[in-house]
Image (spheres, rainbow, N blue to C red):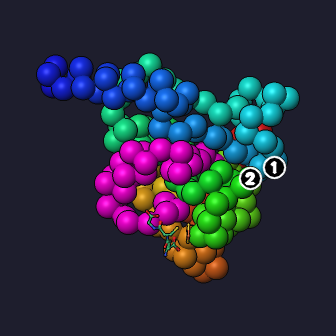
């Protein structure tokens, strides 16, 4: 355990030189704010991208575990909700936006190691990946299907709007 710490720190230090953020930014979206620009200086503090991971020695698997625990709806996607970079991710975001619920997102295209950590965590090979109330739900086809058959509405019943 103690022996592996320097390697983790080395990896993180290297990354902070080449990239300002670790594990990709975490974006939080409330439905009413879903069209905001993530780096808009006028955006309310509550909705600015957060990065609790900077200067931490947390492994990326821990990051994913924490994300999924802290955020009732967590999506790992290609691109960001305002600008998905793949049709599958775009579809998943559109489905989630049908509900008045806050969701959080990370762009796996920002970080290849995060991408691989997410795949390892869920044991699922593709993106997007959606977690609801701590459980892995699936990708865009599954979330669309759950939307169409009413399962998603039931599942999100107790996930309340932020504001
Ligand atoms: N059935 C899946 C299909 C998603 C999919 O095929 N994603 C591909 C292309 S974006 C993917 O993530 N491939 C693995 C990768 O890019 O690492 C869904 O609806 O979410
Ligand atoms: S990036 Fe090509 S299908 Fe998703």
Q: Which residues are magenta?
A: 103-129
Q: CA distance from mark 1 to mark 2?
A: 6 Å
Relative height, residue 45 to residue 117 (above, below): above
> Dot 2, crowdedness within 10 Å: few (<14), some or many (≥20)?
few
Which residue sits at x=64%, y=60%?
Answer: 85
Q: Which residue is mark 2?
A: 82
Relative height, residue 104 to residue 16 (above, below): below
Q: Residue 84: x percent and y percent?
A: 67, 59
Q: Secondary structure at mark 2?
A: loop
Which residue sits at x=36%, y=48%?
Answer: 117
Q: Which residue is mark 1?
A: 35
Is ligand 2 less than 8 Å from the beta carbon at label 1?
no
Quadrant assignment for the C terminus: top right
Q: Quadrant of residue 124?
A: bottom left
Please state if 22 lies on the left or on the right of 11 as rendered.
right
Q: Residue 134: x percent and y percent?
A: 44, 50
Is ligand 2 less than 8 Å from the beta carbon at label 2?
no
Quadrant assignment for the N terminus: top left
Let me know if residue 108 is in the magenta part: yes
Let me know if residue 123 is in the magenta part: yes
Whether residue 67 can be seen here: yes
Q: Secondary structure at mark 1?
A: loop
Which residue sits at x=48%, y=24%?
Answer: 17
Q: Residue 128: x percent and y percent?
A: 52, 62
Pick whichever of labels 1 and 2 is earlier in the sequence: 1
- Marks 1 & 2, CB-CB < 8 Å contact: yes
> How many tags in the picture?
2
Relative height, residue 2 to residue 94 (above, below): above
Q: Residue 89: x percent and y percent?
A: 60, 64
């Amino acid at each position: 355990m103690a022996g592996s710490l320097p390697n983790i720190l080395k990896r993180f230090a290297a990354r902070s030189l080449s990239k300002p953020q670790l594990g990709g930014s975490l974006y939080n979206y409330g439905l009413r704010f879903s069209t905001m620009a993530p780096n808009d200086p006028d955006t309310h503090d509550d909705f600015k991208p957060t990065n609790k991971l900077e200067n931490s020695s947390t492994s990326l698997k821990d990051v994913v575990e924490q994300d999924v625990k802290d955020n009732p709806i967590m999506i790992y996607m290609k691109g960001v909700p305002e600008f998905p970079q793949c049709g599958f991710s775009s579809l998943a975001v559109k489905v989630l936006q049908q509900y008045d619920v806050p969701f959080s997102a990370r762009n796996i295209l920002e970080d290849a190691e995060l991408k691989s950590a997410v795949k390892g965590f869920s044991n699922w090979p593709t993106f997007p990946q959606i977690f609801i109330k701590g459980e892995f739900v699936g990708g865009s086809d599954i979330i669309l299907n759950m939307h169409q058959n009413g399962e998603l509405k039931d599942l999100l019943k107790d996930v309340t709007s932020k504001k």
